[in-house]
Image (tube, coloured by chain):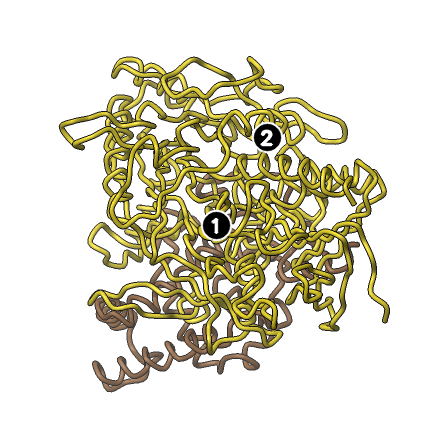
C-alpha cells in the first residue's frame, strides 16, 4: 500500500503535540497526528471510578507494554524490574490528547530564575545543571498565549515570586472556592506571607462549544465531561480538525523513523490497530510521546547513519531525565472540633482549594542552608473524592497492621463522615544526574516485539533537603489553620505524571540533543516538543511550560516551512 | 450482628448468570464468601460484604478476560493457603470450623506476611463492591454510597461506558 504524504507528521497528541497541529493546520499545512492510544471523546467520559482509577483503561496493559525500572536496592546495588512484575506503572494517559485529558490542571508558570539555574545558584556537585538557551522573556508571550488558547482561570495577586506578565489578569476569573481557601489566606498572612491563588487550566466561563466547569468533584485521573478542562484534545486538536487540514490516526504505534542517508527523516513507520506496518511521509517530523517514550523511539530508530539511535551521535538521547522532586503531605479537619457553620462550609463538595505557597521559591535561610538556593512550590488540594481509594487507605493502622471486621467499618465510617483531609503536594527541582536516564532494555520486548524502555531512576540528595524544607512550611500553615494529624512524606520516588528531559535543548551540539528551537542538531527535519527538551524543570508542574514551548516551536517550524 | 440489614435486596447485577462452579468450586466460593464476611461483617454500623454482593462481585472480577492471569491465580491460590492453615491449626477443613474458629484463623493469618497481602487484596475488591457503580454488581441500589454519604459524581456511566465495554465503545471512534 502506498504511503500517505503530509507536510508535518506528529507522533503523540498531548500538550507538546497539539499546539503544533493547531498552529500549522491553521496556516494551511497538511498535518497528521499518530497517536498510540484510542480516541476517547467527551461523551465517553463518566465519573466511573473503576474505569478511571482501578483498571488499565486509560493506560496500556503492563502485560503487553511493560517498562523496566532500574533503581538501587537496599544494598545500594542497581536492580532492574519490569513494571509488569511490580505493578507500578510509569504510563500516563494513553489516548488522543494524552495525559492532559486526565490532569488536574494546576498550572504555574516557570519563573525567570528557572531559565538560568546554574548562573543564579551555582554548580551543585553531582548534578548536571545548566542554564536554558532561552530566557523567560522569550517564553512569556507563549505562556500568555496558552492562557487564552487553552484557557486558564485565576486571579493575579502580587507576591514575592510573581513572574512578569504581559497581561494584568487571566482571561477567565477564578473558579469557585471552598471556605478553606480564605482560611489558608488568613493563616498565611498571620505567618507573614501570601497564599497564592493557583491558576487552573479549567474554564470558569463557557467558551465556544466548551462548557464551564460544573464542579463534579472528580477531576484529576478523570476525563472531563464538560470540556472545561484544557486538554490538548478539546482545546486544540478539536479546533485543528475543524480547520480541515489535520488528520488524527488513533491506535497507531510508531516504531521507527526512517532517514534518507543524508541526515533527514523521510518516513514514520507505525503499527495500525490490526498490527499492520504502515508509513507516513512528511517534510517535517515532530516527536512528542512524553519524555520516556520519545527517547525510546529515537533510540529504536537506529540505522547506519545513526548507529546509536536517531539524533544520538552525541550519545545524549535519553540522558538527564528528570521528574519533579518533593512529595506529599496532609492534615485533617474534624468536623466535631469546628464551629457548626465552619464544618458545613468545609463539607461542600466540588469547590476548589486553589492555594499554593511560593514564598520559598527561592530559599535564603542561613540557618538551614549556607547559601541562597532554589526552593519550590507547595499546592494545597482536598483529598480526591474517589471512594474506593479512600476506603483502601483505611485498611491498615499506623503500624502497618491490617484492620478488618467491625473496627475497620467504624474507621471507614469515621473517615468518610466526620472529617475532611487537606493534602499538599511539594514541587522542587529534580536535579538532572548521570543516574537518571532512558535506554532500551536488552531482554524485554512489548507486544509488537520492540525493546521496551529501561528507566534508571535516581535522585540527588539535594532534592530531598529542599523538599523537606518546603514540607515543613506547609505543615506549619496546616497547623496554623487548625488541621490535625499533620504528616508528610518526602522521598526520591519519581512522580510518573511529571517527567521531562532526555533530549535537552541547548546551543552546543556536543552537550545537547536539540537546538534552541527544539530542532535536532543532527537531523534537519526533526523537532521534539514534549517535555524532553527541558534541561531543568523548574519547581512547578510541567504542562503549561510544555504547551507554551510547543507554541514557540510552532512559530519556528512555520519559518522553516516558509523556506521550503 | 445487628438487625439493620436483614435481607438481600433483589437486584440486577453484571455477575448474574455466572456459574460460580466455572471459576471456583462450591467449597472455594463458600470459603471466600465466609472470609469476606469476617473481613467486612454486616453489623449495626452498616452493610457488610454479603449485603454489597462482594462474593458475586469477586466472581465477576475473576471472569474478567483483561485481568492479569497471575493476579487471578493469586486470589485462587490464597483459598488453598487458608485451607492449609485451617488443617494446620485445627486439623479440619475451613468450612467445618465454627464461626469463632474461622475468626481466630483469620486473626492468625492476618499476622503473617502472605496473609496480610492476600487479605488486603480481598479487602480491595470488597471496597470495590461497596463503592463502585451498582451496574458492576456490588453496591445494590447504592447501599454503600448511602452508608458513607458518598457522592459518586456526575455523569455516571451508561452501559457502553462501563469497564470493559468502554474499550470496544471507544474503538469505534474515528
The chain under label 1 reads: A
In the displayed structure, A7 sits above or below A155; it is below
The chain under label 2 reads: A
Q: Is A239 left, or right, of A137 in this rendering?
A: right
Residue A141 rendering spot, x and y as whole percentages = 60, 25
Q: Could you say which quadrant of the image residue A18 lies in?
A: top right
Looking at the image, tell me whether mark 2 or mark 1 is earlier in sequence order: 2
Mark-to-mark CA distance, 2 and 1: 35 Å
**Mark 2 and mark 1 on one chain:** yes
Q: Which mark is residue A512?
A: 1
Residue found at x 57% / y 17%: A166
Residue found at x 33% / y 42%: A326
Residue A36 rendering spot, x and y as whole percentages = 65, 59
Between residue A205 and residue A341, name the one nearer to us: A205
Q: Is A493 left, or right, of A216 in this rendering?
A: left
Q: Is A43 left, or right, of B22 in this rendering?
A: right
Q: Quadrant of the C terminus of chain A?
A: top right
Q: Is A111 left, or right, of A450 in this rendering?
A: left
Residue carrying label 2: A202
Q: Could you say which quadrant of the image residue A307 lies in?
A: bottom right
Q: Secondary structure at mark 1?
A: loop
> What chain is the yellow one?
A
Colour of the chain lettered B: brown
Amino acid at each position: 500500500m502506498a504511503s500517505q504524504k503530509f507536510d508535518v507528521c506528529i507522533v503523540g497528541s498531548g500538550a507538546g503535540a497539539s499546539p503544533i497541529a493547531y498552529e500549522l493546520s491553521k496556516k494551511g499545512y497538511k498535518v497528521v497526528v499518530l497517536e498510540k492510544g484510542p480516541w476517547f471523546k467527551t461523551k465517553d467520559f463518566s465519573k466511573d471510578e473503576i474505569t478511571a482509577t482501578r483498571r488499565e483503561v486509560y493506560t496500556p496493559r503492563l502485560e503487553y507494554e511493560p517498562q523496566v525500572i532500574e533503581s538501587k536496592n537496599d544494598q545500594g546495588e542497581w536492580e532492574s524490574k519490569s513494571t509488569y512484575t511490580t505493578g507500578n506503572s510509569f504510563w500516563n494517559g494513553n489516548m488522543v490528547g494524552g495525559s492532559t485529558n486526565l490532569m488536574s490542571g494546576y498550572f504555574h508558570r516557570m519563573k525567570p530564575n528557572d531559565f538560568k539555574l546554574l548562573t543564579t545558584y551555582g554548580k551543585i556537585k553531582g548534578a548536571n545543571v545548566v542554564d536554558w538557551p532561552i530566557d523567560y522573556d522569550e517564553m512569556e508571550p507563549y505562556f500568555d498565549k496558552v492562557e487564552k488558547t487553552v484557557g486558564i482561570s485565576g486571579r493575579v495577586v502580587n507576591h514575592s515570586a510573581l513572574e512578569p506578565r504581559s497581561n494584568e489578569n487571566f482571561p477567565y476569573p477564578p473558579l469557585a472556592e471552598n471556605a478553606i481557601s480564605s482560611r489558608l489566606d488568613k493563616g498565611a498572612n498571620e505567618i507573614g506571607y501570601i497564599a497564592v491563588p493557583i491558576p487552573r487550566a479549567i474554564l470558569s466561563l463557557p467558551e465556544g462549544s466548551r462548557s464551564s466547569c460544573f464542579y463534579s468533584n472528580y477531576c484529576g485521573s478523570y476525563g472531563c465531561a464538560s470540556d472545561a478542562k484544557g486538554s490538548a484534545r478539546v482545546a486544540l486538536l478539536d479546533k485543528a480538525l475543524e480547520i480541515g487540514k489535520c488528520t488524527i490516526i488513533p491506535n497507531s504505534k510508531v516504531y521507527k523513523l526512517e532517514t534518507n542517508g543524508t541526515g533527514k527523516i523521510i518516513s514514520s513507520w507505525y503499527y495500525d490497530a490490526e498490527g499492520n506496518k504502515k508509513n507516513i511521509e512528511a517534510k517535517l517530523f515532530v516527536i512528542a510521546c512524553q519524555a520516556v517514550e520519545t527517547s525510546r523511539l529515537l533510540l529504536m530508530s537506529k540505522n547506519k547513519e545513526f548507529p546509536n539511535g536517531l539524533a544520538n551521535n552525541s550519545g545524549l538521547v535519553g540522558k538527564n531525565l528528570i521528574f519533579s522532586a518533593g512529595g506529599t503531605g496532609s492534615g485533617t479537619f474534624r468536623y466535631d472540633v469546628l464551629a457548626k457553620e465552619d464544618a458545613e462550609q468545609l463539607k461542600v463538595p466540588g469547590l476548589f482549594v486553589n492555594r499554593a505557597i511560593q514564598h520559598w521559591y527561592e530559599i535564603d535561610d542561613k540557618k538551614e542552608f549556607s547559601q541562597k538556593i532554589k526552593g519550590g512550590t507547595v499546592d494545597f488540594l482536598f483529598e480526591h473524592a474517589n471512594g474506593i481509594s479512600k476506603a483502601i487507605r483505611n485498611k491498615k493502622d499506623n503500624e502497618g497492621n491490617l484492620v478488618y471486621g467491625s473496627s475497620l467499618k467504624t474507621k471507614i465510617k469515621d473517615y468518610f463522615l466526620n472529617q475532611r483531609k487537606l493534602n499538599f503536594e511539594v514541587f522542587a527541582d529534580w536535579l538532572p544526574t548521570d543516574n537518571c536516564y532512558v535506554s532500551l532494555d536488552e531482554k524485554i520486548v512489548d507486544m509488537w516485539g520492540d525493546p521496551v524502555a529501561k528507566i534508571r531512576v535516581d535522585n540527588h540528595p539535594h532534592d530531598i533537603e529542599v523538599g523537606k524544607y518546603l514540607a515543613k512550611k506547609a505543615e506549619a500553615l496546616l497547623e496554623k489553620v487548625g488541621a490535625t494529624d499533620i504528616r508528610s512524606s518526602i522521598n526520591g520516588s519519581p512522580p510518573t505524571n511529571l517527567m521531562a528531559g532526555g533530549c535537552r535543548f541547548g546551543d552546543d551540539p556536543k552537550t545537547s540533543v536539540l537546538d534552541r528551537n527544539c530542532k535536532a542538531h543532527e537531523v534537519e527535519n526533526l523537532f521534539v516538543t514534549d517535555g524532553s527538551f527541558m534541561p531543568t524543570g523548574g519547581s512547578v508542574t510541567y504542562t503549561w511550560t510544555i504547551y507554551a514551548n510547543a507554541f514557540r516551536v510552532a512559530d519556528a517550524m512555520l519559518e522553516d516551512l516558509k523556506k521550503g | 450482628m445487628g438487625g439493620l440489614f436483614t435481607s438481600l435486596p433483589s437486584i440486577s447485577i453484571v455477575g448474574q448468570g455466572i456459574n460460580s462452579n466455572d471459576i471456583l468450586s462450591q467449597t472455594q466460593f463458600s470459603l471466600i464468601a465466609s472470609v469476606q464476611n469476617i473481613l467486612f461483617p454486616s453489623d449495626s454500623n452498616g452493610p457488610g460484604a454479603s449485603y454489597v454482593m462482594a462474593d458475586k462481585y469477586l466472581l465477576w472480577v475473576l471472569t474478567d478476560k483483561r485481568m492479569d492471569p497471575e493476579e487471578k491465580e493469586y486470589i485462587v491460590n490464597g483459598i488453598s493457603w487458608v485451607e492449609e492453615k485451617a488443617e494446620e491449626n485445627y486439623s479440619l477443613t475451613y468450612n467445618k470450623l465454627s464461626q469463632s474458629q474461622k475468626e481466630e484463623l483469620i486473626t492468625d493469618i492476618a499476622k503473617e506476611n502472605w496473609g496480610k497481602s492476600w487479605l488486603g487484596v480481598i479487602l480491595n475488591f470488597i471496597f470495590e463492591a461497596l463503592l463502585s457503580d451498582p451496574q458492576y454488581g456490588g453496591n445494590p441500589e447504592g447501599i454503600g454510597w448511602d452508608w458513607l454519604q458518598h457522592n459518586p459524581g456526575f455523569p455516571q456511566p451508561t452501559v457502553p461506558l462501563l469497564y470493559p465495554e468502554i474499550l470496544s465503545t471507544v474503538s469505534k471512534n474515528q
